[in-house]
Amino acid sequence: MTRSIPFVVNLLSYLCGTNKQLLKSCVVPKYKGTSYSAVGGAGVRAGQSIAGNGSVLRVDCAPPSYIARQPYLDITVCFDGQWYPSKHSCQRTCQGIDLSTLEKNCTYKGKPVSCDSDVRIGTKARVACKPGFQTDREYDEQNQCLKSGKWKYIMYNCAPICGEIENQDRFEQGFRNSIETIAATQAPWNAAVYLADQNGTGSKFCGGTLISEEFIITAAKCVKDESGSVRNASVFRVALGKTFKDWNDPRDSEVAQKFQVEGILDEDFFKIFFSGNSEIIDFARHIVVLRVEGMVNFDTIVTHPVCLDIQRLNERIPNLIGTVVGWSMHKSASVRLTQFRKPVENNFVCKEKLKPHEKIDNPSKFCTQHARRDVCNL
C-alpha cells in the first residue's frame, strides 16, 4: 500500500487526540467496472464526499470482465483527502484460454499463473497444439493480455491430425486377402459401441468410428430397439483403444478409454440440419453420430480420429484399397480386433454381380470384392 507508514502515523495521531487539525474529505471516484460500498453494506455514489478520518470503502468489481488491481485488495481508505492505496480501481481482464487442444503456459510479472480463468492485463501466454493436433496458424509468437481486455491475437482450437496409424509404411505395402488380427494402435479411430446391462457394463455391441474428440459414427440400426425406435442415449457405452471385444477384458482395461453417451444425432437431426440436401439426408438414414460425455484423450493408443472423405476420393481413385476393422459377430470368431483389406469396386461392376432382388440401396455406399457378404460376419 503506497505511503502506508505516514498514513498509519497520522491516523494514530488523530485518533489519540494529538493532532486536532481538520482532516480533508475524499470524493468517491468514478471508474469503469468499479463500484463502492460502505463497510456496513450501504452503497455510495461517484462524486459523494467521504469523511477523511479513516473511512473505509469496499471496492466491488463488475464480473466477469473486471478484477481487483491487486489480489486480495478489495478496500480503500480515505484519510486527509487521499485514498490509500491511490490506485485501487478494478482492472479489465482477458478471458481465460478455454481451448482444450492447446498446451498453454501463462505468466504475470514473470510468475506462473493459471491460463484457464480470466487473467490480468500484462499476462503473457505461450500456446502450442497438443500432441496429435495441428493448425495452419502461427502460434510461435507470445500472446499478451492488452489494456483493452483483449488478447494480442485471437487463439483457436487446433484440429486433430487424422488418418495416421502405427507402422504406416508397413500398412501401405499391398493388401492381404485374408483376415488378420491386429492391435488397437493399428486402428486408433476404431470404437466399440455397447448396450449397457444392469451392472452398467456393456454387452451386445456394434462397431464405430471416431471422427473428433467427442463424436463417433456408427450404424443407425445399432441404436434402435426391436420396434425401430432410437433408444435413449443413456443406455449406450463407447470404448476406444480396445484390442479385445469384451467390455471388461483385463488385457486392455488399463489402456481403453470408456465413455457414456450423452446424445444421439439421428435421421431427424440430419433432416433439419441438412434441409434441402436430399443426397446427404438419404445417406444419413443409415448412420447416427454419438456424442460422448467428456472428451477423448489422444494418447499413445488412441492417437488420431479417422479422416472424412469430404472430397469423395472413393469415387475418383481407381483400384482404391479399403480396410475393414472390427470384431466378427460369429461366436466362434476371435475376440481380438481383426482387419482385412480389399479393393473398392466400381458400383456399376458391383451391380452386375448382384442378383435381381439385390441392390445398392444408397448412392453413398460402395462395394468391395466381398460383394454379397456382410462384413460383420466375415
Image (cartoon, rainbow, N blue to C red):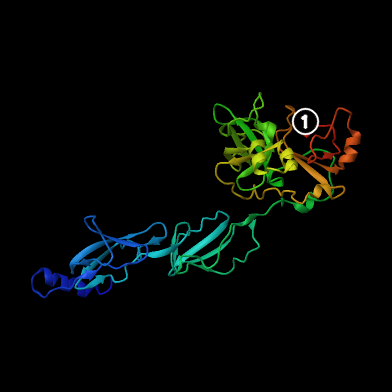
Q: Position of residue 67 (x, y in %)?
A: 38, 61
Front one among 29 and 204: 29
- Amino acid tagged 1: Asn
Position of residue 175 relative to residue 62, above or below, is above
Viewport quadrant of the N terminus = bottom left
The quarter in which the C terminus is drawn is: top right
Above or below residue 92? Residue 253 is above
Report the residue marked by disc 1: 377
The percent position of residue 144, horizontal first and vertical second, equals 50, 68
**Residue at the limit of the structure toward the top, as seen here:** 226
- Which residue is drawn at the image coordinates 42% and 60% (left, top)? 65
Q: Is residue 335 left or right of residue 109?
A: right
Q: Is residue 90 left or right of residue 235?
A: left
Q: Residue at x 59, y 68 (%)?
A: 140
Q: Horizontal and vertical percent for residue 30? A: 32, 67
Circle count: 1
Q: Is residue 83 above or below residue 41?
A: below
Front residue of 363 and 203: 363
Residue 105 in the image, given as x and y percentages of width and height:
51, 62
